[in-house]
Amino acid sequence: MSRTPIKEGQRKFIAGCIIGMLAGFAAFLFFYGETQEKQINKIRELQAGIHLLEEQKKALIDAEERKNTELEKKLTVQEIRISISGRKPDKATRTELEHQVAEELHSLINQSIASVADNRELIVKAIEKKPFTFADIVYHFHVRHIVIYSSLSIEIDISGSEDKSR
């Protein structure tokens, strides 16, 4: 078999094609690299923006949750304050009786203000009908004034007392 030699013109053509392909491939890699670098930079900018927005979102959610918690506290009974007026016994007895009445109404804590206001008459009857005992003396109360808010304030008078030690 005989080989036909490649002519000088054909060699130059093939070499030109190979050099052209290499130059084209080098240009492609250069432009592709530039485009990828721009895309990477754009992605980093967008990720930084997303991170900033997520932080802002988290801060807003935390602020709203704090506001909701505060509003919820304002819409529920948080504490009960009892004060005895009228014929006042000594300070220790008065303090103990106020504590007993507050314990009687303890179930109202964390109840909504609206439900406590709806049951105002039941609260009054619970205080007025139940006898409270301290140091062998039974006390009966009359509700003078009631304020329902986040703090349930009740002012009561001693309507009667019986000494059971006799």
Image: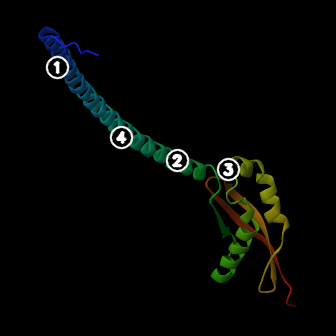
Instruction: Kindly identify which residue carries mark 1.
Output: 19
**Inter-mark Cα distance, 3 to 4:** 40 Å
Instruction: Kindly identify which residue carries mark 4.
Output: 52
Q: Counting other residues with Cα less than 10 Å from the Cα at mark 1, is it few (<14), some (14-19), or many (20 or more)?
A: few
Q: Is residue 35 left or right of residue 7?
A: right
Residue 113, numbered label: 3
Q: Of the residues tagged 4 and 2, which is closer to the observer?
A: 4
Residue 65, numbered label: 2
Q: Quadrant of the N terminus?
A: top left
In the figure, residue 123 lies in which quadrant? bottom right
Q: Is residue 50 above or below residue 85?
A: above
**Inter-mark Cα distance, 2 to 3:** 20 Å
Residue furthest top as drawn: 9
Badge 3 amino acid: Ile
Residue at position x 15%, y 14% from top?
11
Residue 125 in picture, x, y percent from top left: 82, 60
The tag earlier along the polypeptide, 4 or 2, is 4
Residue 153 versus residue 20: which sits nearer the camera? 20
Q: Is residue 20 above or below residue 39?
A: above
In the figure, residue 57 lies in which quadrant? top left
Element under label 2?
Answer: helix
Badge 1 amino acid: Ile
Residue at position x 69%, y 56% from top?
146
Badge 4 amino acid: Leu
**Whether residue 87 is visible:** no
The tag earlier along the polypeptide, 1 or 4, is 1
